[in-house]
Structures are given as structure tokens and as C-alpha cells.
Amino acid sequence: QELRERLAALAPLDIPAFVTGEAGSGRSSAVRALHRFGSTRGGNLVRIDANTPTPDLRTRPRGAIELTDIENFPRPALADWCERIQDLERVGFARASRIFLTSALPLAEWLADAEFSAGLGRFLRHAAVEIPPLSTHLEDLPEIAQLLCSRISQRAGRRQRLSTASLVYLSEKPWPGELRELEKILERAITFT
């Protein structure tokens, strides 16, 4: 519920947003939700990783950019993105592509880094979303599992729901693979039933 409220509060804003969480926790799903329910809905969402050439933001159509796993970006590339975001701030964030950044490292670790805090952290500390590990909020697992089941079965052209017994079974697992593991298990179950 808290995560949903934070995403709903950030979605309509034009400012850059920072999404952190363990691998498989749903960072990209959170970015897609921010994009889909925000001011950039209807535009493209372009994913950029450490190996992707940096696009010219001034010529990009309205949409959003996801800088994924920024812990893998070299420091000079992060400094370059900080300058680009500063340029966008000068002209107004509403006139450019929205930027989302994701990381598997916790927000506190990023903010403890003086270079990051003085640069990108200045823009992101107040527009950050930390996705908790699934194992820390297992009470939400039935709702999450039903939502994933609905999406997956819809893609497969089926109408399936999880039984109470299935939800109890899923709630008893430790989920070291996070949301991604849950999604893969449900995909296999729906495909082969």
C-alpha cells in the first residue's frame, strides 16, 4: 500500500525519479507504472543501460528514458547524465523526456556517496522509491500473485485465477528470487495447465 501511494504521488510529476530494489523486485515494473500513469503516458519508454550510447535529449519526442542499473554506469557517464538533467531543469522538465533511474543498490548507499549526493542525488533524493524485498511483505503476496496471474493468463488468452490452496502454498515460500521468480513460476503454471 505504501509503495502504491508513493508511485501514485510521483507519477504525475515531470521530475526525474529514482527506483531502487533488489534484483527481481520489480524496479522496471515500477518505472512502467510511473510512465503509464504519469505525464509521459502514450509516449515511448526507452531503456538505456551502461552499454547504450547516450541519446540527444533535446531532439527526443515526449516520452521517458529509463537508465537501468546505474551502478553499472562508469562515473563519467553518471556525471554526463547529471549535466543533462541540469540542462533539462533549466528549460523545464515538462518540455523534455522524463528520466527514470533504477538501481539494485539501496538509496542510503547512494546518498552516502558524496559524489552522487552532490550530483544526481540532488535531483533524486526526494523523488526516490525503494521497493522492499518480497520476503518483507508476504502479506501482500496473494494480491500480487493474483494480479500477475491475471496479466499472464490474459496474455496467454486464458482466464485463470489462483486457488486459495495455491495462494497459501506461494505465501509459504521464502522468495529469494523476488517478483521475477514468482512471475516465472506463474507463467509455467498457466502455460502447462
Image (cartoon, rainbow, N blue to C red):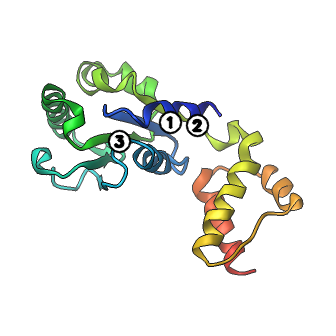
Disc 2, disc 1: CB below 8 Å? yes
Residue 17 point in image, percent of width and height: 37, 34
Task: Give 12 or 20, whichever is nearer the viewer.
Answer: 12
Read off the residue under disc 3: 39
- The answer to whether residue 174 is visible is no
Left or right position of 127 against 189: left
Task: Give 190 or 77, whichever is nearer the viewer.
Answer: 190
Residue 145 point in image, percent of width and height: 70, 55
Task: State the image quarter where residue 148 is shown.
Answer: bottom right
Q: Earlier in the sequence, mark 1 or mark 3?
A: 1
Which part of the image, by quadrant, shows the C terminus? Answer: bottom right
Q: How many neighbours does mark 1 have within 10 angstroms: few (below 14), some (14-19), or many (20 or more)?
A: many
Q: Amino acid at mark 2?
A: Arg
Say which mark, if any, is on residue 4. Answer: 2
Read off the residue under disc 1: 7
In the rendered view, tell whether residue 75 sits above or below residue 57. Answer: above
Q: How many neighbours does mark 3 have within 10 angstroms: few (below 14), some (14-19), or many (20 or more)?
A: some
In the rendered view, tell whether residue 123 sits above or below residue 80. Answer: above
In the rendered view, tell whether residue 165 sits above or below residue 178. Answer: below
Q: How many neighbours does mark 2 have within 10 angstroms: few (below 14), some (14-19), or many (20 or more)?
A: few
